[in-house]
Amino acid sequence: MLGAGGALLAFRPVRRAVCPGSFDPVTNGHLDIIERAAGIHDEVVVAVLVNKTKSSLFTVPERIEMLQEATTKWPNVTVDSFYGLLVDFCRDRQIPVIVKGLRAVSDFEYEMQMSQMNYSLAGIDTLFMTTNPVHSFLSSSLVKEVATYGGDVSALVPAAAHGRLLARLREVAPRS
């Protein structure tokens, strides 16, 4: 491709990536990885897993809405959902890279196996990002458990997700 004055312009494809997860609810650890991925990719799709065998606190549309609210400051981030194989989602949308956050060494073994399977199935690469140490202990499951017993998780999740979490826990709390 020639530019002004006949200079040869290098073709640079759009760098696209997906950040998959259940996000039940989204945490500040998730947002840290999403923000960093958005800083190095042209487009980032946050993909909410639809897992019909797992009981979730929030519906997929609720999780998508929370993520959309939490990611508005990054114009190159969109939110979608998927069911089935992540590599099929990536192929359908021409996304060549999966971004995964690693909290601890114990995460690596499982994630490495998944990344190798995804590469063998579809040639899709996985980029591992170590979690900011501030968030290394954080998981959606732990946030839900602490909040269920009245612990303050307001510093661990975005404000909108925090309000929804407390409201949902009040809805599902056993009546005495």
Image: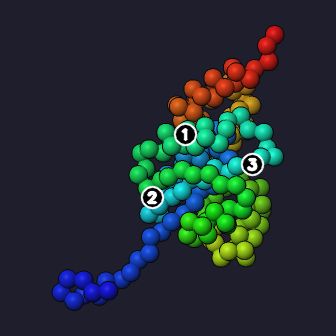
Q: What kind of residue is marked 2?
A: Gly
| Residues packed near mark 2 inside 10 Å, few (<14), some (14 to 19) or many (20 plus) | few
Foreground mark, 1 or 2, reads 1
Q: Which residue is mark 2?
A: 39
Position of residue 110 measured from the top left corner of the image (x, y, whole percent): 78, 60
Answer with mark 1 or mark 2, whichever residue precedes in sequence. Answer: 2
The residue lying toward the viewer, choosing from 98 and 157, is 98
N-term mark: 3 or 2:
2
Vertically, is 47 above or below 88? above
Instruction: State the quadrant of the C terminus.
Output: top right
Q: CA distance from mark 1 to mark 2?
A: 22 Å
Q: As rendered, which of 107 and 158 lies closer to the eye?
A: 158
Checking the image for residue 94, the label placed there is none
Q: What distance separates the C-alpha of mark 3 from that of mark 2?
A: 29 Å
Q: Which mark is residue 51?
A: 3
Q: Residue at x 57, y 60 (%)?
A: 18
Which residue is at a point 66% across and 26% down the rendered structure image?
Answer: 168
1 and 2 marks in contact (CB < 8 Å):
no
Q: Which residue is mark 1?
A: 65
Q: Of helix, strand and loop, which one carries label 1?
A: helix
Q: Residue furthest left?
A: 5
Q: Is residue 28 visible?
A: no
The Cα–Cα distance between marks 1 and 3, rounded to whole angstroms, is: 17 Å
Q: Identify the residue at horizontal 44%, vertical 75% (top origin).
A: 13
Q: Residue at x 51, y 43 (%)?
A: 68
Q: Amino acid at mark 3?
A: Asn
